[in-house]
Image (cartoon, coloured by chain):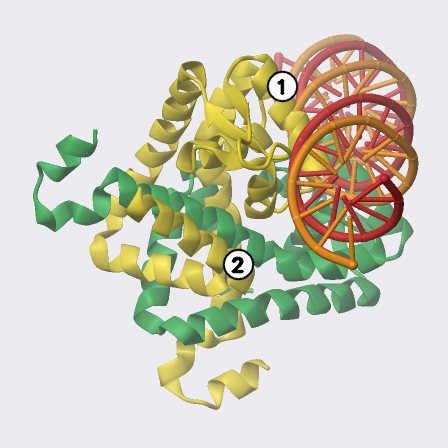
Chain colours: A yellow, B green, C orange, D red
DNA sequence: CATTTTATGTCAGTGTTGTTGACATTCCAA
DNA sequence: TTGGAATGTCAACAACACTGACATAAAATG
């Protein structure tokens, strides 16, 4: 494997097993940093990462249904339900029964929920902004390209759908 | 916050809250892709991500001690011990009492362990290689720069220490 | 040599987050 | 109207992280 990479010449040196291994480890350590700040905040309120993800995407797509959220987050409805229940009980998330289809539950952040979302995303953005600023626009563009190329096709669709929502609403 | 970004002019458009939010979501979805292939393999053997991480770094630094691994992985010894015990029982990891300091346990992959490590890292590298190839060397360089800038300083040291080990051994 | 520190391992208990299984509700179509 | 599909809820369980307490062994220090 390594030799076949090398045999293709210097132009593809960035595809050696060693380079790929370093990329894998960089992802591992960077993701730890990526979640570290929100984790500390969530701890204060007795929440975990699952709560953060739910809050993030409800804020991103207000009025989304449970089923919709399920697919974005990639967990079972039962797992999501536990998280949602505590967020609803604590008054961070509001539920509206669907008007067209009364099986559906539409989810919204309350003011309290929005306030926590702000606290979380401010912290996460601060780290991201600092990293972006350190490396410059070109590196950021490369970063985004690689991440997108690493996603499962299904996740890529979810990712673009979110970006489209943001653009049209 | 958003307005303060915009007021700095077009040169820093990549630092808008919206750009940062997209970066955050890209990290989330990409990390899911990043772990998806190994997760499927681990499932076959009844292992989880914790086992993968241990196997990866034992393979990377053969003879590492438990304490060393603890710091790299950022988990408690109780948590790591549960994972190591099952890997040792199943004959994937071998333990050698330290010769200089007999309190230390040095960890090595057995042949079986190396074989699983190969299976896992081949799958993970395949996705990484495909992503790298899609976007080219420049984008990969940017990717690596941003990841490194996102790490906690302590993690950055661990990351570089691993890269140095690889270079000198 | 006595004491302290370090490295490791274990037991018990807890919390978050994922899973399945069972079940209720609602909608729609045959 | 009856049966199936979609949606959501409740209960029980498993994986894996955590803390705290404790045991052992060996190195380091006085």
Mark 2 and mark 1 lie on one chain; the one further toward the N terminus is 2
Quadrant (top left, top right, bottom left, bottom right) of the N terminus of chain A: bottom right
Query: Which chain is disc 1 placed on?
Result: A
Q: Whole-Å distance between the Cαs marked 2 and 1?
A: 35 Å
Graded by Cα atoms within 10 Å as few (under 14), some (14 to 19) or many (20 or more), the crowding at tag 2 reads some
Q: Is residue B6 left or right of residue A165?
A: left
Quadrant (top left, top right, bottom left, bottom right) of the C terminus of chain A: top left
Q: Is residue A37 left or right of residue B2?
A: right
- Looking at the image, which residue is at 53% across and 13% down? A91
**Between B116 and A40, the one nearer to me in the picture:** A40
Res B111 quadrant in image: bottom right
Secondary structure at badge 2 equals: helix
- Looking at the image, which residue is at 43% across and 58% down? A147
Residue corresponding to mark 2: A24
Res B132 quadrant in image: bottom left
Residue B168 visible: no
Residue A47 coordinates in the image, percent (x, y):
58, 21
Image vertical order of residue A118 relative to residue A56, above or below: above
Secondary structure at badge 1 equals: helix
Residue B122 coordinates in the image, percent (x, y):
64, 70
Query: Which chain is disc 2 placed on?
Result: A
Residue A124 visible: yes
- Looking at the image, which residue is at 63% across and 57% down? B36
Foreground mark, 2 or 1, reads 1
Residue B8 coordinates in the image, percent (x, y):
9, 39
**Between A91 and B143, the one nearer to me in the picture:** A91
Residue corresponding to mark 1: A86
Image vertical order of residue A41 relative to residue A161, above or below: above
């Amino acid at each position: 494997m390594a030799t076949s990479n090398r045999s293709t010449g210097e132009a593809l040196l960035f595809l050696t097993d060693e380079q790929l291994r370093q990329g894998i480890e960089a992802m591992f350590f960077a993701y730890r940093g990526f979640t570290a700040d929100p984790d500390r905040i969530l701890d204060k309120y007795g929440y975990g990462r699952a709560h953060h993800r739910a809050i993030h995407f409800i804020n991103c797509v207000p009025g989304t249904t449970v089923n919709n959220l399920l697919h974005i987050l990639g967990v079972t409805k039962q797992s999501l339900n536990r998280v949602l229940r505590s967020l609803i009980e604590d008054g961070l998330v509001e539920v509206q029964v669907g008007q067209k289809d009364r099986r559906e539950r539409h989810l919204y952040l309350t003011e309290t929920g929005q306030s926590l979302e702000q606290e979380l995303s401010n912290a996460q953005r601060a780290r991201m902004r600092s990293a972006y600023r350190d490396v410059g626009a070109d590196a950021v563009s490369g970063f985004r390209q690689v991440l997108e190329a690493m996603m499962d096709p299904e996740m890529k669709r979810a990712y673009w759908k979110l970006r489209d929502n943001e653009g049209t609403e």
